[in-house]
Image: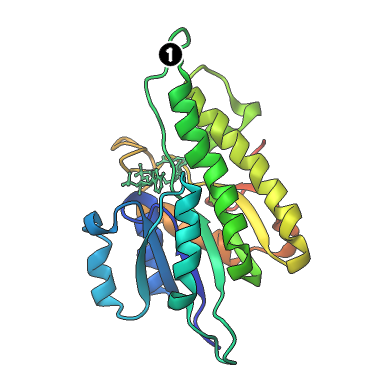
Amino acid sequence: MADPHALVTGANRGIGLALVQQLLASGHRVVATCRQPGRATMLNPLAGEYPGRLHVLPLDVAEPKSHTELVRELPLVLGEDDDGAPGRLDLLVNNAGVLHSGERFGSLTAANFDDSFRTNALGPLLLAQALAPLLADGARIVNLSSRLGAISLAERFGTPSYNMSKAALNMATVLLARALEDRGIVAIAISPGWVRTDMGGEDAEVAVEDAAAGILGVAAKLGAGDSGRFVDWRGQSVPW
Ligand code: NDP
């Protein structure tokens, strides 16, 4: 059987890059997408290490036109499976995300919300819709959410554009699960923990390699009954 094919968004740094490294090491073929492939100085050298197994393609998740361009290019990259049928994606990781820090009640403006919703919530939903014909039946969709998107855990005022967009992503995940269940496709929202990346900062609790390994471990064990769940990187349920 051909090696599974994964697509990761926001793959040039942080959790996305660690996911790509680990997926390649575990035998996946990977489509790594990022806004500016020409500047992906960590990602591009990997293509030399894994010839023919890693393709780096441009994608701005906040721009539906960019989704269309990706969908046009992907069949060339996915090739054909062992039976000569068009290749399909077995795993889609909607990892790209943005956090506007420093928001204060009293000076909120629409711009951060526009950006956060387009990137963190609408982007993953529309991308999954655009890629649906290229997903294998039984594929997995993993949406990088956050405990900050859990309404029941909101104890203080902070980063509202981020928190609200991740709450919207959680709803998008449940709806995606419903939309694709007939094809056996499982969609989950996952909280990666507080991770040492540009977004999480250097004081964060979890090393990026551990977060990535946890996410991929959860993804590998998903069954049909998990679709629409919100879990953490150790597989524990997170309240909505
Ligand atoms: P980073 O800030 O380190 O990296 C974010 C990535 O997303 C970058 O590759 C960035 O690309 C990409 N990105 C942002 N906007 C877009 C866009 N419009 N189109 C394509 N790519 C985009 O974040 P992390 O690696 O820490 O986070 C990854 C995911 O995990 C995010 O969804 C985040 O919300 C989530 N998460 C992270 C936590 C943490 O503690 N780190 C905690 C909870 C959730 P570019 O380099 O071009 O800016």
Would you place residue 167 above or below residue 219 in this image?
above
Would you place residue 116 above or below residue 87 in this image?
above
Residue 237 seen in the figure: no
Residue at 39% x, 66% y: name it: 22
Q: Residue furthest right?
A: 182
Comparing 48 with 204, the one in front is 48
Residue 239 falls left or right of residue 36? right
Residue 228 falls left or right of residue 126? right
Q: Residue 20: x and y, percent?
A: 38, 64
Residue at 60% x, 48% y: name it: 125
Q: Does the residue tagged 1 have its C-beta within 8 Å of any atom of ligand 1? A: no
What is the crowding at mark 1: few (fewer than 14 residues within 10 Å), some, or many (at least 20)?
A: few
Q: Image quarter for residue 220?
A: bottom right
The quadrant of the rendering that contains the N terminus is bottom right
Residue at 57% x, 33% y: name it: 149
Residue at the disc numbered 1: 104
Would you place residue 236 above or below residue 56 in this image?
above
Amino acid carrying label 1: it is Arg
Comparing 167 with 75, the one in front is 75
Q: Residue 87: x and y, percent?
A: 54, 79
The quadrant of the rendering that contains the C terminus is top right
Residue 71 seen in the figure: yes
Comparing 160 with 233, the one in front is 160
Q: Residue 215: x and y, percent?
A: 50, 56
**For the residue labelled by badge 1, is the local secondary structure a helix, a strand or a loop?**
loop
Query: Ligand 1 is found in which quarter of the picture?
Result: top left
Q: Residue 138: x and y, percent?
A: 67, 70
